[in-house]
Image: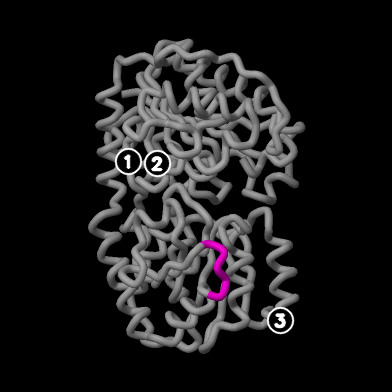
Amino acid sequence: MRICFVSRRFFPAISGMSIYAINLLRQLVAAGHDVTMISQYYGDPARARVYGGGPPPPVPGVRVVGLEALGEQDGGDFERDIDALVEAIARDHAVNPFDMLHAQYGYPTGWATMIAAQRLGLPCVLSIQGGDGHWVGSCCETHRLAMVRVLDHAGALLIGGNSFAGEVHDRLGTPLDRFTIVPGAVDTDHFTPASHAIVAPEPVRLLYHGRVDRRKGVLDFLMALPDVRGDWQATISGIGPDVDPAQALATELGLTDRVTFSGYADYDAVPELYREHDVFVSPTYAEGFSNTILEAMACGLAVVSCHAVGVVDCVRDDENGLLTDPGDVPALTASLTRVITDTNLRTRLATAALEECRRVYSWDAVGQQIVGIYRDLRNQPQAAFDTDLPITPCRFRSEPHLL
């Protein structure tokens, strides 16, 4: 099968979308499919600082096409980038026809891919991920209409878990039976525990890794730390819109001798980063399905997170992690104190998480599930939908990198 995968973000941008994309691409190539990836990217240095930027790197066995998001970088002109995506898909299809289009993120990439699918008479699969499901469509009428039409008309809608599907249903009215649950997954050959476990290390090493963004709870993490008991050190790894506020808060709270900001981490170096720590802290407000939590679990870390959409599908309080309510800093302090001062608890949580990760969250199984969806949908052209949208003011036009 000849497949075109359209990515909202790919490496060198570190995000859940990049991780999802690289693992799916590897699965498709291994299954013998002919794969092209068209990915947006930021070239503007100021915007690239938030997520990483530059053309996507080569992927073995995949034709990679990078499209700089020129419209986003010029006042949040998503429509300009949508036109460029449609043209790129059509141009490649004219040379060597695709059998299937698959987009991640409903807007702008999903919207663009569905327009291309309708014009070319192709089936279209859509993966709803992260903020795409949490807030896109609640920002303006343009994006609301686009998301509703995408959700109503895509050939198949893939989503990471029941909690996330429920949130999208409550927010945009999408019938739950429109969604196919395809859980998050992790490469358990790449993400593995340390070969020699360190027993009761002093200090206990805490890790926050991912986008440095207050919506991911990084500021809550810092605010919880001054009252955490026990011997600990913390690392905040990654880049994002709140690096500067997080560093300023760490200084204000007197944490500079115990908290290290390690910056951008190349994906191939991330497993070792996890293995250098003992507890993964993700006090997030919402996820699609947390790749970083699964990676940490696979590397043998205990997890402290939140009762949040996209987390509760894989983490259960006091069974394979500790959960607090998003934004509850005192409760986060208490959970961190528990996991730092109770070695047996930390070991029990980490062991349960590792076993479940290996048993349930395999990319081999997820890849086979997605290919099965392609087979079922093949030769079913994209259903017709209205592609005209009103252009209305939107907060994301001034900060498109947050979309």
In the image, residue 268 above or below residue 123 = below
Magenta includes 328? yes
Magenta includes 354? no
SS majority, magenta: loop
The amino acid sitting under disc 2 is: Ala
The amino acid sitting under disc 1 is: Ile
Q: Which of marks 2 and 1 precedes in the sequence?
A: 2
Marks 2 and 3 sit apart, C-alpha to C-alpha, by: 41 Å
In the image, residue 313 above or below residue 374 = below
Q: Which residue is mark 2?
A: 165
Measured from the top left, where is residue 77 in percent x and y? 71, 28
- In the image, which residues are magenta? 326-330
Instruction: Tell me if I can see residue 23 in this picture.
Output: yes
Q: Residue at x 49, y 64 (%)?
A: 325
Q: Which mark is residue 254?
A: 3
**Disc 2 secondary structure class:** helix
